[in-house]
Amino acid sequence: MAKSGFLLGLGLLVLGASGELLGHAVFGGLPAWEETLFTYAEGLGFVVGFFSVWIFGVFLPLIE
């Protein structure tokens, strides 16, 4: 669970960052809803990747 959660978070982070970079490079500007979507994907990816490792890799095995 820790590994798959981390990879999911990493995937969201990469998707958000690459979407913003490629969107600005290819189209010049993105609509506001796409900017928000990519920004939230980056933030959620960071949170999911960080906390899944701590919850499933550290905390739950200690209380088991």
Image: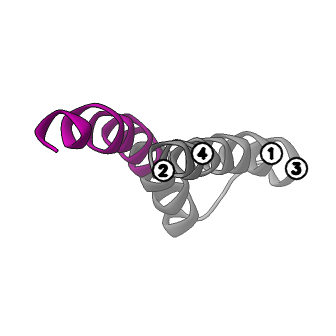
Name the residue carrying label 4.
7
Q: Identify the residue position indicated by label 3 in the image.
A: 26
Do the residues under discs 4 and 1 have CB atoms within 8 angstroms?
no
Report x, y in % for residue 58: 28, 31
Kind of residue sitting beneath label 2: Gly
What's the amino acid at mark 1?
Leu
Q: Earlier in the sequence, mark 4 or mark 3?
A: 4
Callout 4 amino acid? Leu
The magenta span reads: 44-64
* In contact (CB < 8 Å): disc 2 and disc 4: yes
**Residue at label 2?**
5
Element under disc 1: helix
C-alpha distance separating marks 1 and 2: 25 Å
- Density class for disc 2 (Cα within 10 Å; few <14, some 14-19, many ≥20) is some
Give left or right: position of 47 versus 61: right
Query: Which quadrant of the figure has residue 7?
Result: top right
Do the residues under discs 3 and 1 have CB atoms within 8 angstroms? yes
Secondary element under disc 4, as helix, strand or loop, is helix
Within 10 angstroms of label 4, few (less than 14), some, or many (20 or more) residues?
A: some
- Tag 3's secondary structure? helix
